[in-house]
Image (cartoon, coloured by chain):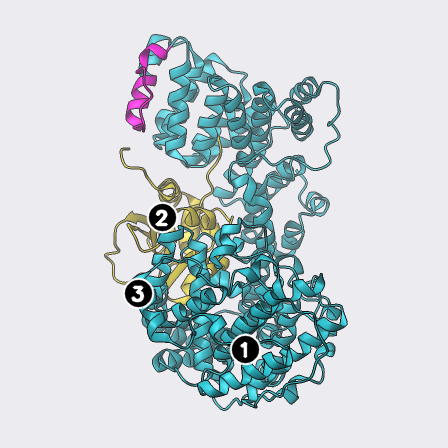
Chain colours: A yellow, B cyan
Amino acid sequence: MAAPELKSDALMEQMKKHLSTDAGKEITKKVGLVYQINIAPKKIGFDEVVYIVDLKKGELTKGPYEGGKPDATFSFKDEDFIKVATGKMNPQIAFMRGAMKIRGSLSAAQKFTPDIFPKPSKL
Amino acid sequence: MAMRELVSGGAACAVPGSSSSSNPLAALANAFTGSSSKTQERLKEVPVATPTGPEQFFPQPDEHLRALPGSELDGAFLPPNAQGSAFMRTFRSAYQNDFSDAWDEVQPGPLPPVAADMRVGPVPQSPPTLEGPPQRMLSGLLHSFVGSSHGGIPFRPAQLPMLGLSEGDKRCIRDRSTIMARHFFADKSEDFINAQVNALLHSLDIDSDVRGRGPLPGRFREMEDYWNESQGMMRPGPHVADGWANEFNQLRVNHGNPESWAHSFEQQHGANGWASEFEQEHSQLMSTDRMRGTNVPNVAAMEQTRMLAHTLAQNNDPKFQNSKFLQFVSKMSRGELIFDDNQVKPASGDWASEFQQQYNAGPSWADEYVQHDGPDQWASEFATEREQHRSVDDQWVNEFSKLNVNDWADEFGQQVAEGAFGESTGDDWANAYEEYFNEQVAMKQRSDSSRGVYVFSDMNPYVGHPNPLKEGQELFRKGLLSEAILALEAEVLKNPNNSEGWRLLGIAHAENDDDQQAIAAMMKAEEADPTNLEVLLALGVSHTNELEQAAALRYLYGWLHHHPKYKALTSLETPESFYHADVARLYNDAAEMSPEDADVHIVLGVLYNLSREYDRAIASFQTALKLKPHDYSLWNKLGATQANSVQSADAILAYQRALDLKPNYVRAWANMGISYANQGMYEDSIRYYVRALAMNPKADNAWQYLRISLSSASRQDMLEACDSRNLDVLQKEFPL
């Protein structure tokens, strides 16, 4: 726990577990795509942490994708990813603001919605 | 008085080149540069677009002003000089600044005078008041001057009565007209420019003495040297005219290198927003050049733009074509959007708007174009923006337009052809744009609370209550959280240093599922009483919920550090930063010392949540619950931990215990909804969210989650009720 970590790490970890539940498997079945999500602590493109949300296999891994080319790649700042994943920010708005950058297939990108992520509960 | 404003615009005039439109001359400049970027896009699409002569502009300015569209854009957030490009400005700058910066940038508001001095920050805008006849005359004269720029027709001076301009006014007009003339007549000879300006000045009875103007803007070489020497030293010139001239030249000189300009400026002034403002000016200037056909550097990029536009155009979905978004773009392309401000009154003869309008009124192709090829507009606008900023926004733009526009365009075209998007795409985007604007307003309101500033309710009936603290405690005990919050707000308004008032207020907000307000209140409580253990624990919990690990650790360490029993465990000096493992170890020591202290186990549970060691966290909370079985917030903490470690079924049982103990516990209701949603039981989750919201309609998180659940449950029919926060409808539809 030495390095200051990303808020998104918590969400990704939850997502990872979530994918093993029935609801998670449902999402995998529904989406069936592989997303790469780059998360930067402060500025997009710098010190990015790479996550692969594989909704073909129902897996979430850290580090570059080894199974070829992801269907779509998103880049976020840490804060903005949290906002999009928890429904505080509409992905299209995030895109227009440049808070979310996309490469790859547009139709794949369109399936990237906040409802594929589990929501964090509050103590 | 109005006369003075017209010309001098107060401080804005003394500071040459200010972009303030409180001065009509500045407005002229704004209008010119603002409109040019739009015109440029049109010129790209229609290479044969011809400059329009003044005669086309003049006949109906008033009609245009009367035809202000009552549009989807509320005047409230488009200041007069923000024009249609306000959106693009924010869009553009969002890549490097927070949105709020960008918003601040387009927002008229009081600024420290230094900003005005530097002529880069936004300057308070107010539509110029031009009611009186002399103002009309001056306005008309300046208009025809501008008009002459379009056709390249020599400006014919008109004889005006004495306008009573002061020396300063005159100097101001002279200096600015000279600069502007150089913008307008960039493709004309120096002699022509001088003749134009002299004609204008003569009719205004202003001495066109060149010597009085200081360095001539035309002497680029000299200015370039000056600029190179003083890179970033943005100091106002010795003379009024110098600043303008300098700016003009700096912008020009830096055509090739806008980035260094932005950077040095940023270094100098430390404000990102300003840099982007300058980029913008730069790009506008650049587009001016392009429009004049003197500088068309990037043919390849234009090619890409056109290609993207072309593929987008193939979407003939009438929904898209008729969407408000397209109307918006269309209006923007015609320059109408700049009038969408209630403050701009038709009679005021607002220079900027009139100019803008005239500038855009000529070619009516924009309308037709949108009708036929709707999406092109959007595409080209979008791509043009990117392309303009390539040199500055290197990451984003290069990546996007160089590498990906082809991909995207192809793919988009293909997918449109295949009907991959169904019918909703156009609407989605249109809606997103509307949301975007709504959000701007909301963001403004919310920005306070996100900065940790407590936001008080309006219309608080408890203000003036003899003992609001007691009332608040009473209400809190009864479980009437929202009422208790009002009473406690009245208390802390009365006694701002009452730690207990703030603390309970914070607790009430946390239970009401509003962590932002909870944190704001708790920080006030901490200010009033820095060693209050409950406050420190509550702050630790709230920051954990917000995933702010460093802050959470600091408060949780503070709890131990100030605890009479455990402070011996901590070192005398509070370390600068904390390692989770160290803090956890201290708490484990504490737990060994007194295993019967439920609070220590509670903090441990929070700590393990922070490090996502959920099994340990659950064990800690369970231990604490054995000691404190009636602590409803503890049951909720256990539930939330179980939920976050994906044991949703267990979590629901724990929440149920919490709600048995405290039926109005909004947070537990909302958490309940989350657990159902995370199990894919969206219908159930909706009922719990609605229940939570019925108790606290201000729980923003719950509204967002409700929206997600509604769409996941295919209840789009209820989205409108959700967006308008219509609880009556929602409660009727989703009773619990």
Q: Residues within 10 Å of mark 3 (few under 14, many from 20)?
A: some
Q: Quadrant of the N terminus of chain B?
A: bottom right
Whole-percent x and y of residue B299?
A: 36, 82
Tell me the amino acid under the disc marked 2.
Lys
Indicate whether A39 appears above or below B510. below
**Alpha carbon distance from label 1 to label 3:** 30 Å
**Residue that numbered label 1 is attached to:** B208
Instruction: Compare residues B343 and B557 and report the one nearer the observer.
Output: B343
Q: Chain of mark 2?
A: A
Q: Chain of mark 3?
A: B
Q: Chain of mark 1?
A: B
Residue B507 appears in view: yes
Indicate which label's residue lies in the foreground, 1 or 3.
Answer: 1
The furthest residue to the left = A66
Tell me the amino acid under the disc marked 3.
Asn
- Magenta-colored stretch includes residue B586: yes
